[in-house]
Amino acid sequence: MEKVKQRYDELVERIKKYNYYYYTLDKPLVDDATYDELLKELVAIEEQYPYIVRKDSPTITVGAVIQTSFTEVRHDPPMLSLSNAMDEGEMNDFHNRCAKLLGTVDIEYCAELKYDGLAVELVYQNGIYVQGSTRGDGEVGEDVTENIATIKTIPARLKGDFPEYISVRGEVIMRHGEFERLNQQRRQSGEPEFANPRNAAAGSLRQLDPNVTAQRELDIVLYGIGKIEPVAKALTQSQLYELFKTLGLPAPHYYRVGSLQDVKAFYMYWMENRYTLDFDIDGVVVKVNSFDVRDSMGATSKAPRWAIAWKFPAREAITVLHSVDYQVGRTGLVTPVANLEPINIGGVLVKRATLHNFQEVKRLDIKIGDVVKVIRAGDVIPKVVDVLKDKRHNVREIVTPETCPACNSKLQHEDIYIRCVNPSCPAKEYETLCFFVSKDGMDIEYVGPELLKRLYEQKKVKTIADIYALTRDDLLQVERMGDKIVDKILDAIHQRKEVMLSHFLRALGIRNVGDHIAKVIARHVRSLDRLQELSPQELMRIPEVGPGVAQSVYDFFHNEESLKIITQMLRNGVTVKEEVVEEALENPFKGKTVVFTGTLQSMSRQEAESLIEQLGGKASGSVSKKTDFVVAGTEAGSKLEKAQKLNVRILSEEEFLKMAGRA
């Protein structure tokens, strides 16, 4: 029992320390997954040994210690935190508890996104904004009235038939674009960067000078109510959101009302699609929808019984950096790649992670042997984002290479990057081959990296031109290669011998030339011969082609080795067709810029953008003042919000199809 008590006290003190650093100092000491595991262990001990529970246990108290530099604000009623569900089983347990309390399994829930920001409360009296405060410890928060007033989406005066008094609660967040801008600014001025958007939002909101907060673009989403007088007409969570909208308050765009199965579908969708948002979420909040039902269920001293935060699987973890490899890309860019002690992040075993570039290595002050924090960016590409220097011992420096790890040529320094400029570098040659056959290149089916590696090692293929000269005998000499697959490979290569100029230009992998720019250039010059004649100045006269693109294209088509490869491709049967540019008939999209957001039911995003281009318009990936239309599908994201702010015309999918003549 003594060991249990010792472990319990240790957990209480550690979690209290982590809470102080996270909530009060905005400097998290551990990742969310580690914190959740410790808290889960603490709860388990308290459930088994309730007589040892301390009054200052983090399971009873909420949030942060109040900073003395801010005036205190008492919350009425208290701002409770939420219990967590870490997996589907714990979500089912929550549902069963609700069903037991209510005497029925037929429960209507409201599921909404769990925003990763700073919890706040706003007070309006007679429709006028009079106070804003942080959650603090739940009972008492910090007065940040002036700072919250700098948030553009917060109305100074409510609209419509507003109540005499209303306190509303929500989350202050920072969107990814503003987070990147702010960190870039701090890098340039020599200040430490914010670890993540949540810390940036918290640090910005709690500035002693509101002018500093005003210089940082914060946003807010309101999802709850503290007190309202007279009593609100809203009887459910979903009705509350409609009330917020009529009052001019920023309510969530993404929520779903329904059964437990509907909640699970909502959770699964956002677990897979959270990276389409331009702000951070770390789960889904599930609430019993009816306010009357909630009142009958009540709350504990810390959390309501009618709500739970169903968190996503961990997307970050702590592990050890064992060694660093130097990876050479098709353009010669050399990047450091971390070899890690294998760690499970969100259900995926991660062994390697990007370190971006050598300036990032220097900024992080990372060394071989360090204990590091790793995240899965976009839930796909793991990257090292932080070093736990208090755990550092027996480490070695990461040395910036002076010569290429693949060909031993001297590397060239370009701003924050280093590059191999040897055109015959085997790593560059191989990566160029892989890109050429990929979906972003010529999309040659059945020809993948593994086959190319074998062919390259056997000296059957060295350049992209050699792919079109492959014979049956060449392929049959590759290990485990049979007649049927050889036939498929040769047929796939043959199908890609005739190609439009824009597709060909994209597949060559010229620096700074992606799919869109390749189409822009091809439509302007029409033919490969004409493209090869243009000077950098003439290329820059093409709309959207800047100096970097112009120089890259010119250098490629005036490089002796590149010209040899193109000539050989043509000799091997490749035909580069002239770009066909049909003059679009008059239509509402001709000459207009269109942005798509959300999911379209009638076609894919790529098909929709292609249709706009056929109609003489331009499909863009971001919303700006120059955007003419935003087409909003289901689950439309932040682009829709920005379009609304900029008063850009928004079209439903049905309106878009009618205007495009496809309905």
Image (spheres, helix red, strand yellow):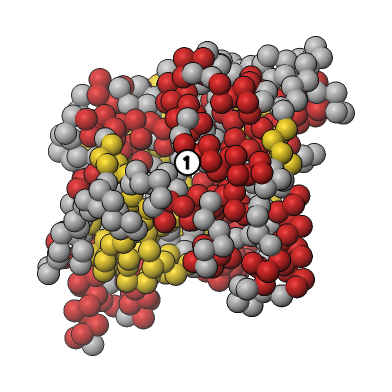
Hey, which quadrant is residue 195 in on the image?
Answer: top left
Please state the horizontal and vertical placement of residue 236, each as a whole percent of the image. Answer: 62, 43
Front residue (pair 427, 575):
575
Residue 387 visible within the image: yes
Image-based side of 494 in relation to 334, left or right: right
Q: Residue at x 45, y 55 (%)?
A: 381
Q: Can you give x and y, in whole percent of width and height, for residue 237 in the image?
A: 59, 42
Relative height, residue 186 to residue 49 (above, below): above
Number of numbered labels in the structure image: 1
User: Closest to the observer: 438 or 469?
Assistant: 469
Residue 331 lies left or right of residue 67; in this view the side is right
- Image quarter of the C terminus: top right
97 or 363: which is nearer to us? 363
On the question of residue 101 being in view, the answer is no
As helix, strand or loop, the secondary structure at mark 1 comes to helix
> In this picture, is 58 found above or below 415?
below
Q: Residue furthest right?
A: 663
Q: Residue furthest bottom?
A: 1
* Nearer to the camera, 72 or 14: 14
Where residue 98 sits, quadrant-wise, is bottom right
Report the residue at 75% width, 63% height from top.
488
Residue in the image at 62% along x and 54% along y? 467
Q: Which residue has dot 1 on it?
A: 561
Give coordinates of residue 7: x percent, y percent.
22, 77
Q: Eyeballing the image, is 115 above or below 222? A: below
Say which residue appears at 19% left-offset and 56% top-offset.
Answer: 399
Is residue 105 rendered to the left or right of residue 216? right
Q: Residue furthest left?
A: 394
Image position, residue 35 (x, y; %): 32, 62
- Give the quadrant of the N terminus: bottom left
Task: Give amino acid for label 1.
Answer: Glu
